[in-house]
Amino acid sequence: MLSVPASRPNAYTGSPLDRASGRREDQAFVAAALADPETLFAPVWRARSLMKGVEDGRPEAVLLTGAAAEAVRMAGGPWAFLGLWSGRPVFAVDCSGADDPLPLLPEGMGAFTDLRAVAGLLPEGEAAVLAHARGLMHWRVKHRFCGVCGSPCEPRSAGNATACTGCGAQHFPRTDPAVIMLVVRGGRALLGHSRRFPHARMFSTLAGFVEPGESLEEAVRREVEEETGVRVGDVRYHSSQPWPFPASIMLGFHAEGLSDELDIDPEELQDARWFTLAELRDPEAHGFALPRRDSIARRLIEDWMGQAAP
């Protein structure tokens, strides 16, 4: 099977942050950083990130300092140390407790926007920082109580962990691994359409979560056969993409299809088809659409197309 390397980094990768995990337990450092007017804060409001320039098609992240940062911190939500950006501390802060946080900020600070809608347009590194903040704040907001005994949890490690006030159990953010794969056979690629897709004509690569006790390669083969009935042979790693929506990492593969006939699971897919190179190179003319350009699904497709025989 053709081994196709990643042609360029995926969205949400390439973070400019030094996570500086050794400073998380340094209470004096954390306290000084929180009080420093030059410290940067990435606010998250109900899973949305603060940006400006979105309507003009030139989005950029808005990180708060000084009084503006203090205003959103007063909303009382959780916060966490993300790391250092060119030596400056960066924190995430959740301000979802405010019905509308924009009046708390100076005019012209932008608006809170779904990161997934603009990630491919953000300056390099900014999408990674905002994704980091979003994922960590989701965990802090949704895991306020101990999964062992149900008691409230308190933040530890500058917001990167919690400890149960009842049984003392420690809790850390979790990331669920999901495989995403382009299955190819005889110069054709297998794509599926899910009812969950935002566009009625979009076809994308297959994907699914890794189950306990399962290797990544086994997960690829199981998911493809369960969803489409196609058997898979060789599986080659391509690249990965953080996907904190809310807490996953996408592990991308190219996989060799061993059979042609489709037996679609209607609970998972509305449709699935084998597409030729000609169809993939001009999807509009053939009545379908490919996934967004910032997605690892699109990268898997384009990288295979770039090295497949004409």
Image (tube, rainbow, N blue to C red):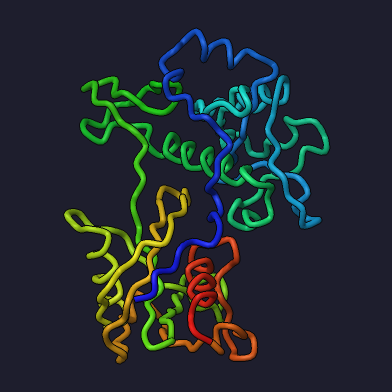
Percent x, y for residue 300? 47, 68
Horizontal relation, residue 78 to residue 25: left or right: right
Percent x, y for residue 162? 35, 26
Residue appearing at x 43%, y 24% in the figure: 21
- Residue with the most extreme left position: 213
Residue appearing at x 55%, y 40% in the figure: 15
Residue appearing at x 60%, y 66% in the figure: 293
Residue appearing at x 30%, y 69% in the figure: 235
Quarter-of-image position of residue 8 = bottom right
Percent x, y for residue 34? 59, 16
Front one among 94 and 172: 172
Front one among 259 and 92: 259
Front one among 166 and 193: 193
Q: Is residue 62 visible?
A: yes
Q: Is residue 76 above or below residue 8?
A: above
Quarter-of-image position of residue 193 = bottom left
Percent x, y for residue 102? 72, 37
